[in-house]
């Protein structure tokens, strides 16, 4: 007597994921925050970083970002990681590699220039991302608020970014903020 082959749990999982994918417009990237409403956002690397990076998660996060109106990715990752994937998904991509701790960032003005380039396009809605939201990213964001003239006082810029990111900005991160 032949038995019907049982359905494997991995097959059910795949069917379930395919059903969800049709109904849900993607996943919000980790640590996603709007810095300038509708214009500049920040998140961890799309799809996760290191051993946690997943292609399916990246695709879901890209769909979510598109639904939020993001049309430009400013990547601080080395070597333009995932640039081709972002371009294929229809994003404008700018890569400006920033590696290491805040004390190792020697081209702060270059990062601000890349942010200006990304945001100066009419209708641009920009996501800035790096492997993690750390002192470097927080300091660069606060620094950009001062650089762009949106906030004139570095102390207020620090406070604003700390509130947005939900974490304190240490002395190394604050060292990236220009004093005017």
Image (tube, helix red, strand yellow):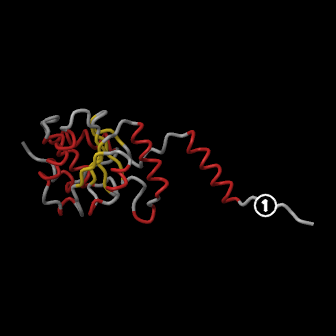
From this view, report whether residue 141 is shown above or below residue 84.
above
Rendered image quadrant of residue 14: bottom right
Q: How many marks?
A: 1
Q: Residue at x 17, y 46 (%)?
A: 143
| The image quarter in which residue 51 lies | bottom left
* Dot 1 crowding, Cα within 10 Å, few <14, some 14–19, many 20+: few
Check the image and name the residue furthest to the left: 180
Q: Identify which residue is drawn at 21% across, 44% down.
A: 142
Check disc 1 and report its element: helix, strand or loop. loop
Residue 6 vertical placement versus 15 (above, below):
below
Residue depicted at 22% across the width and 59% down the height = 98
Q: Nearer the viewer, residue 120 or 35?
A: 120
Q: Quadrant of the C terminus?
A: top left
Residue 156 position, x and y percent, is 19, 38
Residue at horizontal 32 percent and vertical 38 percent from the top: 34
Q: Residue furthest right?
A: 1
In which quadrant of the rendered image does the N terminus lie? bottom right
Q: Circle 1 is placed at which residue position? A: 6
Residue 41 in the image: x percent, y percent? 31, 41
Return the x and y of residue 157 as percentages of the image width and height.
Answer: 20, 40
Between 140 and 96, which is closer to the camera in this rendering?
96
Can you give x and y, in whole percent of width and height, for residue 36 in the image? 27, 35
């Amino acid at each position: 007597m032949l038995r019907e082959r049982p359905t494997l749990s991995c097959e059910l999982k795949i069917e379930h994921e395919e059903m969800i994918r049709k109904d849900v417009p993607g996943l919000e990237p980790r640590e996603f925050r709007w810095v300038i409403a509708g214009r500049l956002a920040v998140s961890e690397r799309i799809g996760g970083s290191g051993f946690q990076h997943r292609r399916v998660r990246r695709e879901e996060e890209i769909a979510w970002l598109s639904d939020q109106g993001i049309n430009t990715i400013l990547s601080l990752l080395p070597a333009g990681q995932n640039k081709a994937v972002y371009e294929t998904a229809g994003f404008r991509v700018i890569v400006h590699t920033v590696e290491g701790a805040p004390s190792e960032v020697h081209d702060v003005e270059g990062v601000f220039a890349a942010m200006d380039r990304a945001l100066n396009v009419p209708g641009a809605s920009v996501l800035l991302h790096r492997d993690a939201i750390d002192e470097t990213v927080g300091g660069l964001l606060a620094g950009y608020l001062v650089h762009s003239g949106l906030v004139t006082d570095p102390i207020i810029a620090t406070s604003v970014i700390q509130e947005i990111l939900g974490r304190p900005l240490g002395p190394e991160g604050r060292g990236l903020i220009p004093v005017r």
